[in-house]
Image: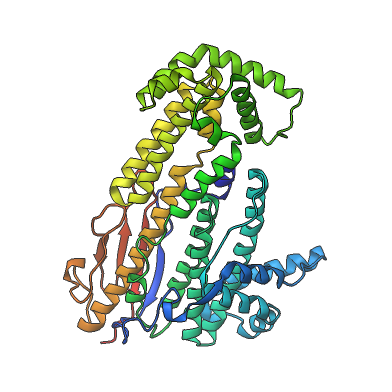
Amino acid sequence: MRAFLILLLLPAFVQAQFPPVKLTVDPAVETRPALRYELLPSARDRVPGNAMLHYLRAAAAKPPLERDPAKLLLESNLWLAWEEAKIDQFPAKEVAEYLQKYKSLFRELEYATRCKQCDWTSAPTNPNEAIADRLGEVQSFRYFARLLSLRFKLELAEKRTDDALRTIQTGLQMGRHIGDAPTLIFMLVRIAIDNIFLGCINTFLEQPDAPNLYWALSTLPKPFLDPRPGLDGEDQLNESFFPGLVELRKGPVAPERALELTVAAMKSFRGEPIAPGLADIGIRLELIARAETHQEEARKELFARGRNQDEVAAIPSVQVVFLNSFERYRDVADDYRKWFLLGGPDATVGVKKVSDRVKKLKADTKGDPITQVFLNILPAMEKVYYSMARTERRIALLRTVEAIRIHTALTTQLPKELADIKKVPVPNDPSTDKPFIYTAGDSGFTLTAPELKNQPGQKYEVTLRIKK
């Protein structure tokens, strides 16, 4: 189920390169003080409290959904028109009146994103219900992000620069809170929301005399996207999906108990009631037959992985086959985890190799229902990783654009190459650890993150309003 949901949330990246981002900007020196603007709330602005409570209040503050289909469609079309409108054509008065009904919701989001913690702890439920609960929460956050991006455009249209940047700060901090949720499903939602507000930064930089955000971007956490909470949550969720996993891993149990726990694990993953039923007979017979055929192979593999030989010999056949399938899964899951946490160019290669291993293991164990069940709970890890990598690249590209704006403001001319920029460090492409491809023109430049084997290229085409 989780693999399906993650694939559902992933956008379909099929093009070799995203459409170029086209900007017209002014040269601009560093701000003073350097961190006059920050893109996440600073420690001095954080207050005690649990952000989750305020997010729940924000959800409760949503105005009732319009019931008339015609009026609902009209409102939806208005939103789309406002989201696509350029700032100089933005209907500020109309949008300001519309957003009045969201004052309480916005207030709760401000409170939430200034809290020192966001505790996602909830009462235990069965894993399928837990995922359904999370998906319901996801929809609220997508709604919040669209509202905040609309308010951001209103603030820019009204020349309220500081307010507009605070709204970006609110949106990015909300994304961080979502990324702290114990599932990779929420990491994907975080990536989508982060990219909404990175898009807001593009819009911000185009405004005449926009302040330089080099240090605001450069002091974001590195890596900006931390996969650890989601990876930890996936591990914990496995124990919920497979009742009895902890007991089966501790050591030998009675053969009938091993069969009972394995049947329950299979039914839980399939979303079937755990209580005994007629379907159990078929599952039991399948597991027993499988165990008799493959127990010796499983014992050899468990022993090779470092398990005590006498203990392995004492484990009932059904249990030993189940444990070996789990260890196969755990081996590839840990390999994914190590590359996710390492990050960078080496991780890009490593994640691809693990994904190839998983595909081969799935093919080689096609007739093994237990191993297939464990492999199917591995979400679309490769795609999750590359979604994260694309966002890290985008931030580095924006930093480089701002470094060029600083250089041009100080010298009144574009750098011939990125190495000419001396005032501030110019970041490398985080996916290659090499400089971005830079080409200067008469009145602007292009900055390119090239297409890689598993990542589309990204390009900025920037025109500078250089005052002679």
Please identify the quarter of the rendering in which residue 202 is found: bottom left
Q: Position of residue 461 (x, y in %)?
A: 35, 66
117, 341: nearer the viewer: 117
Q: Residue at x 62, y 54 (%)?
A: 134
Q: In the image, is 376 to the left or to the right of 218?
A: right
Q: Position of residue 396 (x, y in %)?
A: 33, 64
Vertical relation: 442 (above or below) 320: below
261, 231: nearer the viewer: 261
Q: Residue at x 52, y 32 (%)?
A: 374
Vertical relation: 272 (above or below) 321: below
**Image quadrant occupied by the N terminus:** top right
Q: How many marks?
A: 0
Q: Position of residue 178 (x, y in %)?
A: 53, 61
**Is residue 3 in view?**
no
**Image quadrant occupied by the C terminus:** bottom left
Q: Position of residue 398 (x, y in %)?
A: 35, 68
Q: Residue at x 48, y 63 (%)?
A: 195
Q: How is the image coloured?
A: rainbow
**Is residue 464 in view?**
yes
Q: In the image, is 163 to the left or to the right of 269?
A: left
